[in-house]
Amino acid sequence: GPYDSDIHPETGVEHANAIANAIAKVANARPAFVYSDPFLRCTHTANIIARTLNCTHRIEEGVTEWLVPSLLVNQDGVRTDPRSVAELKQLFSSIDDSYTSV
């Protein structure tokens, strides 16, 4: 979706759970870390996956879709920035706030 929107509370959560469950079913495929960009929908999805797989969630700004202008404005067209790691940690406890983005 446009701007820093969250995942859909039903279908978005359902999709994130399906991804996590599919990874969990693969033998020897348990990751130690799940990385996401700092945008809310990616962070929320990664949080669900990390919690399900019991692994650490890290915010990596290097995977952000900076070239998609609609992600950098709010619903009113005003330029915004993604939330900080500290702000995201308040929303999602699985985030490793000791990690420094490359």
Image (cartoon, helix red, strand yellow):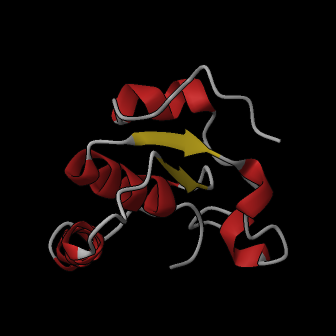
Residue 80 screen position, x and y as percent: 72, 51
Residue 26 in which image quadrant: bottom left
Number of marks:
0
| Residue 77 seen in the figure | no
Looking at this view, name the residue that lies furthest to the front.
Answer: 28
Residue drawn at x 35%, y 68% as measured from the top left: 7
The structure residue drawn at horizontal position 59% and vertical position 31%, both measured from the top left corner, is 85
Q: Classify 48 as above or below 92.
A: below
Left or right? Give the position of 88 relative to 101: left
Where does the image place residue 3, in percent across and percent down from the top left? 60, 67
Q: Position of residue 82 (x, y in %)?
A: 65, 48
Residue 30 in the figure: left or right of residue 96: left
Snapshot quadrant of residue 99: top right
Q: Is residue 17 visible?
A: yes
Q: Residue at x 70, y 64 (%)?
A: 73
Q: Residue at x 43, y 54 (%)?
A: 31
Image quarter in which the C terminus is found: top right
Left or right, 5 with respect to 10, comes to: right
- The extreme top residue here reads 98
Report the side of 54 relative to 84 (left or right): left
Residue 74 pos. (x, y %)? 62, 61
